[in-house]
C-alpha cells in the first residue's frame, strides 16, 4: 500500500449567495473518487482534510470533475499539512488570534513575483494590517472584510489567485489535519 500523506483542500467561491452550490457530501465523494481517503470537511465553504498517496494533480482534476458534474469550475488549492502549519507559525499578528474572525490568511499556489505593495498600502484602512510572507497574505481586519477595499483589491495587486480563510477555519483545519495524520497508517 502506498504511503498516504495528509493534505488540506480549499475551494474558492462555492456555496456563496446560492451560487456554485456543492454539498460537502458530494465533495467528499468526488475526492474519494480521485483517490483520497479519510476525507473530512469543515463548514460548507469548501474546506477538506484528507489522506492521499499522490496529490500532484489533485487540484486540476478536482476542478475538472466538479465542472463536469456540477457545471462550474472552482479554483482549488491543495497543500500539505506542513504548509498550513508553517502559515500559522508565520502569523505576523499574534495579537489578532484572540479575535479569530478578524484575522485572515490568503493562500496562493506560489509566492507573488511582483506584488504592488504601494497599491496595497493605498487600499488599507487605518484599522487594517497586512503582510505578505511567501505564498500567504495575512490580513488583520478588525472591522471585517465585507467592505474592506484592501480585501477586495488584494488579488489584483498581488497578481495571483488567492483564497481567504479566517483564523478560526485555519485552526480547525489544523486540528483536523493533526488528528488525521495521527490516525493514518
Image (cartoon, rainbow, N blue to C red):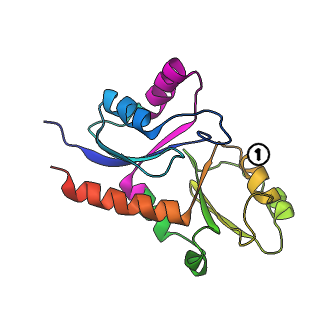
- Which residue does the image show at 51% across and 18% down from the upper left? 68
| Corner quadrant of residue 58 | top left
Say if 29 sits above or below 12 in the image.
above
- Which residue does the image show at 46% across and 70% down from the upper left? 89
The quadrant the N terminus occupies is: top left
Say if 143 sits above or below 2 in the image.
below
Look at the image and give the residue range highlighted in magenta.
59-83
User: For the stretch drawn in magenta, what is the main secondary structure?
Assistant: helix
Q: Is residue 165 magenta?
A: no
Residue highlighted by disc 1: 156
- Which residue does the image show at 84% across and 60% down from the upper left? 123
Q: Is residue 80 magenta?
A: yes
Q: Secondary structure at mark 1?
A: helix
Say if 17 sits above or below 153 in the image.
above
User: How many other residues sit within 10 Å of disc 1, few (<14), some (14-19) or many (≥20)?
Assistant: some
Residue 162, percent from left and from top: 62, 47
| Corner quadrant of residue 160 | top right
Taking the view exactly as shown, the residue that stands out farthest to the top is 68
Residue 27, percent from left and from top: 43, 35
Taking the view exactly as shown, the residue that stands out farthest to the right is 122
Amino acid at each position: 500500500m502506498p504511503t498516504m500523506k495528509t493534505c488540506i483542500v480549499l475551494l474558492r467561491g462555492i456555496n456563496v449567495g446560492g451560487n456554485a452550490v456543492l454539498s460537502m457530501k458530494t465533495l467528499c465523494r468526488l475526492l474519494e473518487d480521485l483517490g483520497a481517503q479519510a476525507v473530512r470537511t469543515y463548514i460548507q465553504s469548501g474546506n477538506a482534510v484528507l489522506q492521499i498517496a499522490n496529490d500532484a494533480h489533485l487540484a486540476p482534476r478536482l476542478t475538472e470533475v466538479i465542472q463536469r458534474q456540477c457545471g462550474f469550475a472552482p479554483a482549488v488549492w491543495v497543500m500539505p499539512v506542513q504548509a498550513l502549519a508553517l502559515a500559522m507559525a508565520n502569523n505576523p499578528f499574534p495579537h489578532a488570534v484572540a479575535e479569530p474572525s478578524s484575522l485572515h490568511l490568503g493562500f496562493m499556489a506560489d509566492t507573488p513575483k511582483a506584488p504592488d505593495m504601494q497599491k496595497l498600502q493605498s487600499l488599507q484602512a487605518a484599522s487594517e494590517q497586512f503582510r505578505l510572507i511567501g505564498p500567504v497574505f495575512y490580513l488583520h481586519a478588525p472591522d471585517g472584510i465585507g467592505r474592506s477595499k484592501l480585501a477586495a483589491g488584494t488579488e489584483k495587486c498581488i497578481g495571483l489567485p488567492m483564497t481567504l480563510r479566517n483564523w478560526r477555519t485555519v485552526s480547525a483545519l489544523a486540528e483536523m489535519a493533526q488528528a488525521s495524520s495521527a490516525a493514518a497508517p
